[in-house]
Image (tube, helix red, strand yellow):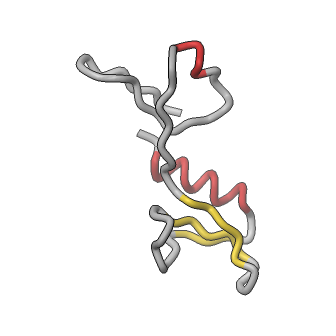
Amino acid sequence: MTLTFPPDGPATCLYTDLIPLTTLGNLSVRRASWIDFNEHSQHWEVRFGPHDDDPVFTHSSREVCLAWEQQQLDL
């Protein structure tokens, strides 16, 4: 995880439970992507918007999708 502290703004990162971020103060959290299971294809699908038609990544493992998401979105 990359935690960035810009001089003129709040810290930013891709959230994880590995670090207790609440110890830094109040959090403001926005969803970075959507990872949902497609029953038809039997794969997990990653989308950057809730209404995006085409997934940007798919895999049979949700953990692989989470790792891919982190690699793509980690600041």
Q: Quadrant of residue 5?
A: top left
Above or below — where is 1 with respect to 64? above
Residue 24, horizontal then vertical, whole percent: 52, 14
Residue toward you, 41 or 51 = 51
Residue 6, horizontal then vertical, whole percent: 29, 22
Residue 54, horizontal then vertical, whole percent: 49, 79
Above or below — where is 65 with respect to 18? below
Residue drawn at point x = 57 percent, y = 56 percent: 68
Residue drawn at point x = 46 percent, y = 33 percent: 13
| Side of 75 where 45 appears, left or right | right
| Side of 61 where 2 appears, left or right | left
Residue toward you, 72 or 53 = 53
Residue drawn at point x = 59 percent, y = 13 percent: 23
Total labels drawn: 0
Residue toward you, 32 or 74 = 32
Above or below — where is 54 with respect to 4? below
- Quarter of the image for the C terminus: give it: top left
Residue drawn at point x = 66 percent, y = 66 percent: 36
Residue 48, horizontal then vertical, whole percent: 46, 62
| Side of 15 where 40 appears, left or right | right
